[in-house]
Every structure is written in structure tokens, then in C-alpha cells.
Image: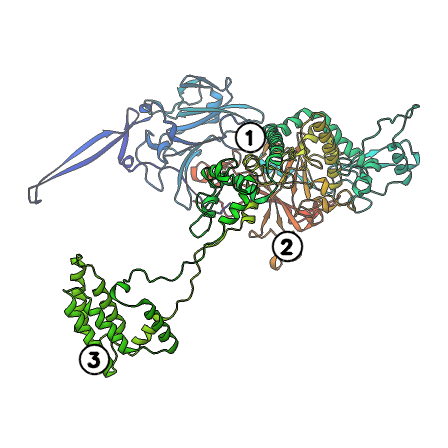
Amino acid sequence: MTDQQLTFRAWVRERIAQAATGVQDGRPLVSTTVTLAGTDARGAATTAATRPVRFLLAGPADVVGLTPAAIGRRYPAPGTTDHESDRCPLVEFTDPALPWRYSPAPGATPGSGTTHPWLVLVVGVEGEELTLAGDQVALSPAVQAAHPLGAAAAPYPWAHVQDDATGRRIARVLSGRPLQPGTDYLAALVPAFDAAGQRSWAGTGPVIVPCHDHWRFRTATPAGSFEDLAARLHPGGADPGLGQAPLDYPRVPEAGGLAVRGALGPLAPPGEPGGDPPLPGAVRADLTGLRTPATDPKGRPIVGLPRYGEAWRTGAPETAAWAESLNNDPRHRGAAGLGLELGIRLQEELVSEVSASLGALAEARQRIADLVLGRQAAGAVWERRMPAEPLERLWLLGPALNRVVTPGGTLGELATAADRPLPPGIFSTAARRVLRTGPARTARSSAGRVRPGDVLAAANQCRPAPPRADDGVPLGELGIDLDELEERRRHAAETGTVDLDTAVEVAKALAERADSRLRDLAHQIADRLAEAAAAGTPAPWARALELLVAAAAVPAADDAAVRELITVMQRFLELFPAPAEEGDLDDVLDGLEEPEPVEPPCRPVDLDVLTDVVVTAFDPTGPQAPAVVRVLETIDGLDPAQPLAPPEPCVELDRPVWADLRAAFAEWLLPGVGSLPDDSVIALATNPRFVDALLTGLNTQLLAELRWRGVPVATGCTPLRVFWDRSQAATGARVADITGLQHWPDDSDLGSAAHRPAGAAGQDLVVVVRGRLFSRYPATVVYLISAEHGAGGGGTADFTVDPDPAAPRIYPGFQGRIGPDVVFFGFQGVEPADVARYWLVLEEPPAGYRFANDASTATAPHSWATEAFAHPVRVLIAGDRLDDPAPTPTPGSGLRPADPQGAPSR
């Protein structure tokens, strides 16, 4: 709770009420002057006049009722049955000025004057002191005497205004009369003044007044507040015999006294660390003999004692240490028997919960059964009809390749793509009709038929590259001997030289054959080439020969092409010899070289791989068969190793078993709980051995019941794993007490840490309180806080000083009630032996601001509120006293204000 300073004031009124100089007809009379000043169009003052004005403000008789939003809080809440008899009933208003707005009194001087509220809260026993009739209430002289009224200008101690540090202001009207415990009361909000402005009652006789609000409540029994009940608590250590019950084993009299421990027990149980003394060997041997299956005179086995662990260790459960203890130690066998009995008593409820958790399991099992049947039938047809030859299989499934979709397209499209040798129609039905056996077109083939595999193999061969051709250039038509040209090309490519004289002759010959419109330009180009060859200067031979060939080959009818060539050739002559370079002839030589052979864009299909992919995709018996995938995608929670097996889920019930144990055998939560003294606080520890044994017996019975009723359940399942209602403080998630029994190591005994989920402690600290505190205040805040004040909280516990406010708080991870007056709080992860390092803190539950009816006799409202203000209480109990059988007073223990700096001031 954040500390904050509170300021109490006696009254608050609107400023207009300060102008009231008297009272007339039960209403405040305001006498004042009003001045009216006139101005012209330019704003200049013209005339002014002052006149006296008298008017009345509204009084109590003018109020018909209050709106629901006028009241912000009623304390105690309507219908409360356990109100503290030493706390004042009160009403808080959303408008701070409302309780004094209609008071028939002249304006009081702020800071020194007083004003009586026009509303007061009257509390009394209905029928004896108060009688409610519609919107009126009759007050007896006794209740009038308990709520005396003053004059309109007199102070009223039970009404005030509260200001806090944030600036929030609350008006409050209270009833400060004493209350009796275990009594029904009626609270009525009534006007304090009548229509004439006089007090509504003087205590001389019964009166009837308007009632603007009312509610009923009952005080608690016995009398007292949180502080009173908390002060009665006394910490102390648990009796050594608490938490265990005697066990008699009459078959072995010399065994002596044995004891069975319950779910909770003292911090330091006698005997071995686990809390159970060694079991006499004679008892173990006798119990083992009783478990040996007996036979009747005819040799038939007789049903004997349950064999715990059989559901998880089929055949030989005693090979596990924990199962051996369960079966051969009567103490643990008794705890398992409690679980077995719980399973019998709760069988209908537990089976219903399991069945509800299974959801649509029956539908899923039927769907899988139908899938398996269809898969087997389709598989039989598949094996009978599918050819043995791989390519024959591919041929058979070929028409369906376009139905197999991949990220890059269908298989049919990929297999017959442009870079594949297979023609697009190879898998079509038309190709199958052409190649089918029987027609005349296949009669002459080998064996009178065409083998589809051979067709596929032949069609999958890439065609050879076409030979070199000089298509597009009509050299022969131009009078050029192609053979001679080829010979010269080879010579030039081999020697690296070009015969320029021959090139000039070819250029001139091409110019002679040019179109008549181009001939003059062609001769000019040929002459330029001849001059360059004679002078040995560079010339654009490649570009020039290209233009001459074009001029000789252009069709005479193509006027557009001729015009374009004229423009290009003229431009060429203007720039000649540019762009001639020294390397121009090298480019010509490079063009004369034999080009490197180019591999055709062809990638044969790997038919074997394609066959495997297609057969796998269509195989109805495969794990990824379409029907299998479609059906299994609709079912969650299947075993990945056996997805087609009938699903048998392991349902984990979110059911804290401790509550079931309390309902059936409450004494086994804490044996001897009845011997706890009243108002006692002790520290105990959980007993993981008892939890392991009881949950094993309960799960044994539940699994047997489920199988008997035909409810599918996984082998080795542990449906019930939660005993205490524990949860993670950070996430609120449920924390199981055990893992599945199938995961318990064989060498672990009952109560082993290996039986706990990861991060769960073997034992937890539990604080048990017996008394009326939590019956009256069930919302009491309980937590542990470190009593160590060293660096990092690692010092020595010091209970002579209050805990560090910044120290972290540890809240209970689970809690519950045993009987009407015993509650327990379990602190998950806190070692029981560490209790001496902590304070146990009990904080009064927040209930808003409250005031005591027996703490002040002041008449000034602000003084009465300051003295009667009830601070929230925090109880600090030293942890070292919770395990001390005979605790001595510790200076640090006792009651502490939860907000010590929050004392009101004015």
C-alpha cells in the first residue's frame, strides 16, 4: 500500500452559500447588491445602477431524492453478513459539497465557522429502532438518542471531507453509534432538518422522516476487527505426533507401533530423513506372503491384493523400488488404498471427465478405421494391376501426371518442357490410342505390339544438332563460288591473313550486282576499300562488305529497304574510314573461324527417378498417399510412429486430488488436525511419499475402470498428476505433483525428486492457521518476506527489526481449507527448513477507508476523523517461532500498521 497523507475538513459548500445571511422558510436567505453598468457602441461607460437583491437557496424540503450516481460507496456493502462491530457504517458521495449544500444555515466563515450537514446516516435494528415504509422511515427515541442532531450552524462529528495527496476529495457521512455483534441492522440516509429548517428529531418521541437511501447488513460474531482476531493468533511448533495416524498390524504382534503419515506433517519427522522409520522385516515378509496368489482346492488362483505398478511395469512391477515399497510396506500400501477407494467412489465423475476430454475420439477412430480398410482394398488392386516393369508403370500412370502439382508446375509439364526431349503429347490419351496393340499401324512391330517402355526410352533421346548452314545470304545468286569461299575462309582462319586483293575483287563484284539505285554508292564503297588496301591503311572491311552484300541482295520491289540502305550507305561514306581500327581485320578473321559446337538445349528425363516419384505419389499404401494425408490432416494428437493405429490418447485431468481427499477422508490431509489449539499458527511440510502412493492407487483404479468400460487410453498413461492445487506465480499455469509413472526410474523410491516435474521441489513449506481470522476475512493477504538484512538478502535473519520493504515477497502457490476453521498456505519451492529465514505476513484485506466507532469522542469533524481513522493492519510472525514447540516472545513479532506513515492530518 503506497503511503499517502490524508487531510480531513469539517465541511465544504459552494461559494454562493457564503453569501447567505439568514434563513427563511427552511432555506438559506442571500442578501446582496447587484450593480448593472451600461456602455455605448464604442464601449465607453454610460450609466450604472446598484440595487439590493434578496433570494432563497434550496433547502432540505426541496430535495425529492438522490440520483443513483450521487453515492459512490456504501460501507459495509449491502447484504454483508460479517461486518466488524467496531467499524462505522458510512456513505461516500461523488459530489463533495452535497452533504452541506442544502443545510438551512447562513454562510460560515471558511477555516473557523461550522455547518451541520443536511444529510445524516442513521443505523438501527429494523423493527425495534427503525421501521421502513416506502420512501419514509420511522425513528424510535432510542435511535434518535444514538444519533443526536445539532443546530444548522453547529458541528456534526460524523461528517467530513477527505483530501489526499493526489487532490482527490471525498465527502463522507458516518454513523458512529456502537454496534452489537451478530445483529441485523438497517442503515438509512435521512435529512437532518425539516421543511421549516428545524432539527428532524429531538429524541422526545417517534418521528417519521424521508429516506433517501437505505441498505441492510449484519455484524459478525464474535465481536472484533481484523486487528482483534489477528492479535489472538499465537505461533508454535507442531506436535511430533501431528500428521500421522497409528497403524496396527496384528499378524505380526512384535512389529510394535507403526504410523502412517498423511499429506502434511511436521517439519522434522522422527526417524529417517523421509520421515518413515524402517519397516520390520517380519511385516514385509508376511505381507509379501499374503500377496502371493493362492489357489483353491482345485488349483484355481484366488483373486488377492492389488498389485500396484502393474499398469506401468507389466509382469514384474516389484523390480522398481517405488513399486516394491507400495506393495510390501503396509504404510504406503494403505495410502495407495485410499487412492484406490477414491477411484471407486469417484468413478462416474472421473470417467465422465475423461470422456469429455476425449472430444471427437470416437469419430477419429472410425475415420482411421475406414481409412485403413480403404487403404488395404486399394493396395490389393494396386498390386494386382500395376505392371512389374518400371517404365510400364510410368506409361500406365502417365495420363495422371498433370494432376501431380509441384512448386514449378505439374509433373507432366516439367517432363515435357521445352528443354526436355519428351514431346508434349507423349503421355496423352491420343498417344496411347496410336500405340495400343492391335491396329494395323502396330501389326508389323516386334511381337505384333509396341512396348510403351521402348517408346518412352526412344522418345527420351536428344536429337543431334543440325549442320552449319549459311542460310539467308544469297551468295550463290550473286556469282560467288561457295566452295571457293569456304576454301578461302579456311585458309584465312588457318594462316591468320586475308587476301585483300581478292576481297577488293569481291567488293567490286558485289557493287556491280547492286540495285541500280544503290550501284553508285556501292562503287564508291568498293573504291574506298581498294584505296585502303593499296595504301595499307585500316578500313571498316566487315561493315563495308556487309553493306555491299545487302545492296546486292535487296529486292528491287522493296522500296523502303532501298531507301533505308541509301541512307545507311551515305552515312557510311561520310564517316569513312571511321570506325576503322587496327583490329578490324582481326574481327573478320574471328568471324571466319569455325564456331564452337553448341550443345542443344536438351536435358533427357531420368525416367527411373520419374517412375519412382510417380509410383510413390499414387501408391495408395504409401505413408504419403493422398487419402492418408487428407484424413490424417484432420486429426490431431496421433502417434507419429503409428499414425494409422487406433488412437489411444493419454488424457491428463486438471483436477487437484487434495479436494477429493478432503471430501472423502479429510483427516488424512493432516491427521490429528483436531488437536490443534484454537488461534494457532504452525509450519508444516508436504509429504511427497503420501502423494506418490495415493496418486498411484487412484490412477490404478481409474485405468482399470476406463478399460472395463472400453474407453480408449494409452498404455502407461497417468491421467491424474495433480494433488495440491499449485500454480506458477509468474504464469498461473498448473504445476503437477508427479510425472507419468512410466517415467519413474526403477531405482527411485517413493517421494523421490525424480518423480517430480522439472523445477518442482520434493517438499514445500506449508503454514497452517486455526482460528476465525480467515473465516471472517477470507481475502487476507498472506506472504513470506525475508528477515535477512545482509547484502543481497544473504545475511542472518533478524526478527528484531521490520523486514526490508524492498525485499521480494513469496506468495502461496497453493492453499485450501480443512474444516470450518483450519486453513493452509503452501509456498512452492520454499524448503521447509528455511522457514526460520522469513517473516510470515498477514495483511488486512483492502476494504477502503474505515473508521472506528469507539476511538474518538471529539466533536470537531476533522478531529473525530483523524482520531477514528482505522489504519490497515499487517501481522508479522517470526518464522523461527513457527517451528518452536514452546515459543518465547520475540520483540519483532506482533502487529504492524500496513501503512505506518498514512496517519491522517489536518
Quarter of the image for residue 746 reads: top right
Residue 162 shows up from this direction = yes
Left or right of 222: which side holds 849?
left
Left or right of 543: which side holds 752?
right
Quarter of the image for residue 148 reads: top left
Give the spatial CA distance, label 3 vs label 1: 132 Å
Left or right of 819: which side holds 144?
left
Which residue is situated farthest in the bottom direction here? 535
Residue type pointed to by label 3:
Glu
Crowdedness near tag 1: few (<14), some (14–19) or many (≥20) residues, C-alpha within 10 Å = many
- Asked if labels 1 and 3 touch by Cβ distance under 8 angstroms, the answer is no
460 shown above or below 336: below
| SS at badge 2 | loop
| SS at badge 3 | helix
Q: Residue beneath label 1, please?
A: 85
Q: Residue beneath label 2, please?
A: 788
**Circle on res. 531:** 3
Which residue occupies 51% across, 18% down? 128
**Front residue of this view, candidates 668 and 50:** 668
Give the spatial CA distance, label 3 vs label 2: 112 Å
Comparing labels 3 and 1, the label whose residue is closer to the camera:
3
